[in-house]
Amino acid sequence: MTQRIAVIPGDGIGTEVMPEGRRALEAAARRFGLDLAFEAFDFASCDYYLEHGKMLPDDWKETLLEFDALFYGAIGWPDKVPDHVSLWGSLLKFRREFDQYVNLRPCRLLPGIESPLAGRRPGDIDFYVVRENTEGEYSSVGGVMFEGTEREVVIQETVMTRTGVDRVLKYAFDLAATRPRRKLTSATKSNGIAITMPWWDQRVAAMAEHYPDVDVDQFHIDILTANFVMHPDWFDVVVASNLFGDILSDLGPACTGTIGVAPSANINPEGRFPSLFEPVHGSAPDIAGKGIANPIGQIWSGAMMLEHLGHPEAGAAILAAIEAVLAEADPTVLTPDLKGRGTTERLGRAIAERI
Amino acid sequence: MTQRIAVIPGDGIGTEVMPEGRRALEAAARRFGLDLAFEAFDFASCDYYLEHGKMLPDDWKETLLEFDALFYGAIGWPDKVPDHVSLWGSLLKFRREFDQYVNLRPCRLLPGIESPLAGRRPGDIDFYVVRENTEGEYSSVGGVMFEGTEREVVIQETVMTRTGVDRVLKYAFDLAATRPRRKLTSATKSNGIAITMPWWDQRVAAMAEHYPDVDVDQFHIDILTANFVMHPDWFDVVVASNLFGDILSDLGPACTGTIGVAPSANINPEGRFPSLFEPVHGSAPDIAGKGIANPIGQIWSGAMMLEHLGHPEAGAAILAAIEAVLAEADPTVLTPDLKGRGTTERLGRAIAERI
Ligand SMILES: CC(C)[C@H](C(=O)O)[C@@H](O)C(=O)O
Ligand SMILES: CC(C)[C@H](C(=O)O)[C@@H](O)C(=O)O
């Protein structure tokens, strides 16, 4: 059975790492006899916007609904299009209109990658951030009053729903229940954000009753970020609102030294809509065009995509190949961010050969 | 001229570290010939709430307005009173009703304190977080609809005003202008929080025009937290909204290993209302009553208070005494969090003697 994958490179280094992501997927497909069909699109990029005055064609939804998964590069180029325009017109639209309500991001200390934290070794840090991905603090409701005057007031509403929060909590608890430590940490700020967050805590407590085997704790987001740095080994599955999850899923990979290589999955668990897989890193205008971007985030995202599409062994093989190439630490292969002198393509080829 | 200081120990270890904070202030007063008068209050604590059904007496405002500064311990004891009740009924009320619109928190790598970051040495990290302290994400506007049903929706409004944002930006720019590096970093999230945050960016840009000598940059809060871990040496003065500043001012001290010792100043710069000085740490119910809490956060907050009250040399002497005692690293003096076996009082006395 053919599985169709929409390839959307986006902006900047997105267009450079995407071919390597595809190369790894093709290698895995050959090895495991998968039937993957790729189709590339130039929309959801700032160049597309400059040409068409919008981020997406009008029929984007019907077009993409035909696919089993979306493989996305990176988006944003503030000198061409303001970020809130490009993002809300593409990535955030996909997440919301395809109801990809789970954003899943692994934080793992990999061999051969230097962590900025003192004395941590591979195996010490291994957790997931499960981020609510459609509502919460990322709303577009609100506005400005007394615009341009001294009295100017700007309001933006955080909107949480029981449906929206319960389903992501359920996903996180289910995930925690499959892991050896069976531990779930909730990110809150109920001492300061005094309406939505105490309610979030109640929903966590209500969901916890259905999972007596899962060990639950919670931290306010301020001290939680501090604990990511001080005690990253405490965490197993961390569940968070849209904004808190956004923060934690950059900070977590930073603590493992993997911000340039971390993957992310934007999942519609019921499969009513295609899910989207993209690296955590952005489009990096500063190094775009040089051919030196690290492709591992894109490749690892591909591994998550294969797992989601029902091929966990193929996903695991890609991750193992990444780990093997990193452990080898050949400076002619690794990209400059990993202190090597290789290129995007050189590193991508090395991983594909391993697969 | 006598300066009157209201002493409010609050909850938990707040009551244990406060005497040491006072001891250091008294030592500094003797050495520098300051005339400080202390008066202690039992309100703004959870025990007071249990007895009186409220966190503060009705005349708290008139009472405290008589003072030149408020010296606060720690607040909160969730088993007695829910955090959002105790906090909104005390600390957050002080900040708001006394218009302490700047929350100033130094992040500094001190001698003798182990940083969780690899390879960083004293001097490498030295910046301030300037947090907006009265509005923004900490609003009490909003509510629940369809309560208790599947359709439940919870809304909370972030409210920013030009007055509120401009004045804290001005404070931060003024501070940056006095520092050798003259650098200011703005914490934003204008790519996701698409109403308030693009507007915040505009206010920063407008203020920057008045400070051509200050070097300004900005990061989205997600990558900013990552950069605190990866590149803490990049920062000099970081200005942030209430929530983002809350996060950054726990994370910054965590990166310098000083979360247990960091101070904070809640300042009304015009002096219309008393300012409030408190350690960053909380009431720590888990170690309360054992006499082993680290008093340095309280003592360092006292140093900031003296600086604010017009005695910078006395504040500097307290900070120098803290650094000297830390550098000595006597395990019979240092508290257990610093890997010693001393008590709160032992460490407090050692610092007071140095002053
Ligand atoms: C206790 C809490 C409400 C408070 C805050 O969020 O402001 C604290 O974390 C702080 O930073 O002073
Ligand atoms: C680009 C931005 C809008 C996005 C987000 O905040 O969700 C990114 O930071 C991410 O985490 O995917």
Image (cartoon, coloured by chain):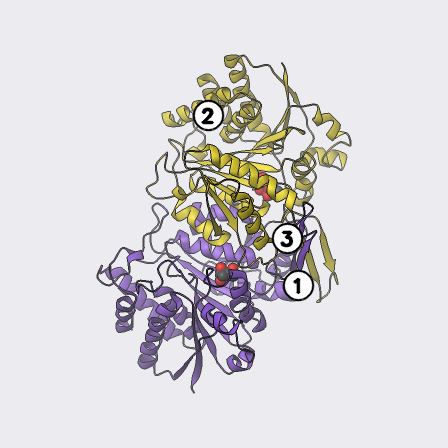
Chain colours: A purple, B yellow
Q: Chain of mark 1?
A: A
Specify whether disc 1 shares its chain with disc 2.
no
Q: Chain of mark 2?
A: B
Nearer the camera: disc 1 or disc 2? 2
Q: Which residue is mark 2?
A: B319
Amino acid residing under circle 3: Met
Where residue A297 sits: x, y (%)?
Answer: 38, 64
Q: Mark on residue A197? A: 3
Q: Do the numbered discs 1 and 2 sit on residues whose CB atoms are within 8 Å?
A: no
Q: Quadrant of the N terminus of chain B?
A: top right
Residue at the far right in the pictured view: B58
The CA span between labels 1 and 3 is 12 Å
Where residue A307 sits: x, y (%)?
Answer: 42, 73
User: Would you say the beta carbon of the disc 2 residue lies within 8 angstroms of ligand 1?
Assistant: no
Q: Which residue is mark 1?
A: A161
Residue B42 in view? yes
The CA span between labels 1 and 2 is 48 Å
Residue B336 against residue A230 in the figure, above or below: above
Comparing B269 with B7, the one in front is B269
Residue pictured at 56% horizontal, 14% vertical = B34
Q: Earlier in the sequence, mark 1 or mark 3?
A: 1
Q: Secondary structure at mark 3?
A: helix
Specify whether disc 3 shares its chain with disc 2.
no
Specify whether disc 1 shares its chain with disc 3.
yes
Nearer the camera: disc 3 or disc 2? 2
Count of marks placed on residues: 3
Residue pictured at 71% horizontal, 66% vertical = B151
The CA span between labels 3 and 2 is 37 Å
